[in-house]
Amino acid sequence: MRIVARARTLAEREGWEAVTTRRLSTEIEYSQPVLYKHFGSMEDIVEAVALEGFSELAETLRAARRDSAAPGDEIGRVAAAFSGFAAQNPALYDAMFTRSTRLHFGVEDTPAPPAEAFSELREAVATVTAARDIDTLTEVVWAALHGLVVLGRNGRLRPGHDADRIEVLLAQFRAAGS
């Protein structure tokens, strides 16, 4: 949809503060009432962008997991793919993980795209651990990767050590699963 694509392009180029319904309607040559027929609010647009992003993240993680050469390598490739996705799509990542939306995770009505992204990470985590509560372990890996991404992006961690940090993190999970 043109509205979602334009919102995403503007956000990546200028930041989310540049994305307004007025600006979108001008950019795509829709009147604001027409835009509001498609989306009731700016939050609805951000949510649509986020859902699109989760679909892309799921595919990115799936490809990384399937491209792994050796058993146990999936988690490393998936973690690196997660970090790379966030680095390549900062505004999209913000829509998915840091901007306020009505998207909820780990509940019955979790939309399919975030559930699929989580499932791909879960499949990779399962290759290195026989933990009884694989969902909780996957949530911890998800949260740790998110923390590394955000702290690194905001200059709170030393530059150039992303891969090292991911390997330290994953070594802890591999050791716990042994």
Image: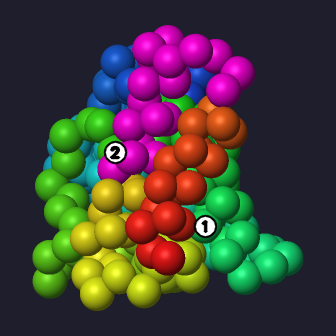
Find residue 109 and report its horizontal and vertical position in percent.
Answer: 16, 79
In the rendered image, residue 147 lying in the magenta stretch gets the answer yes
Please state which of residues 140 and 103 is positioned toward the viewer in this rendering. Answer: 140
Q: Is residue 110 visible?
A: yes
Q: Residue at x 39, y 56 (%)?
A: 142
Q: CA distance from mark 1 to mark 2?
A: 21 Å
How many numbered discs, if any? 2
Tag of residue 148: none
Q: Residue at x 25, y 71 (%)?
A: 136
Q: Residue at x 53, y 66 (%)?
A: 174
Left or right: 17 in relation to 170: left
Q: Mark 2 = which residue?
A: 97
Q: Is residue 161 above or below residue 166?
A: above
Q: Residue at x 66, y 36 (%)?
A: 164
Residue extending furthest right? Answer: 69
Find residue 27 and report its horizontal and vertical position in percent.
Answer: 51, 29
Q: Which residues are magenta?
A: 143-161
Tag of residue 75: 1
The amino acid beneath tag 1 is Ile
Determine the image quadrant of residue 114.
bottom left
The amino acid beneath tag 2 is Phe
Q: Are marks 1 and 2 in contact (CB under 8 Å)?
A: no
Left or right: 16 in relation to 133: right
In the rendered image, residue 107 lying in the magenta stretch gets the answer no
Left or right: 151 in relation to 43: right
Q: Is residue 5 above or below residue 147?
A: below
For disc 1, the neighbor class at 10 Å (few under 14, some 14 to 19, many from 20) is many
Of the image marks 1 and 2, the number of the one nearer the N terminus: 1
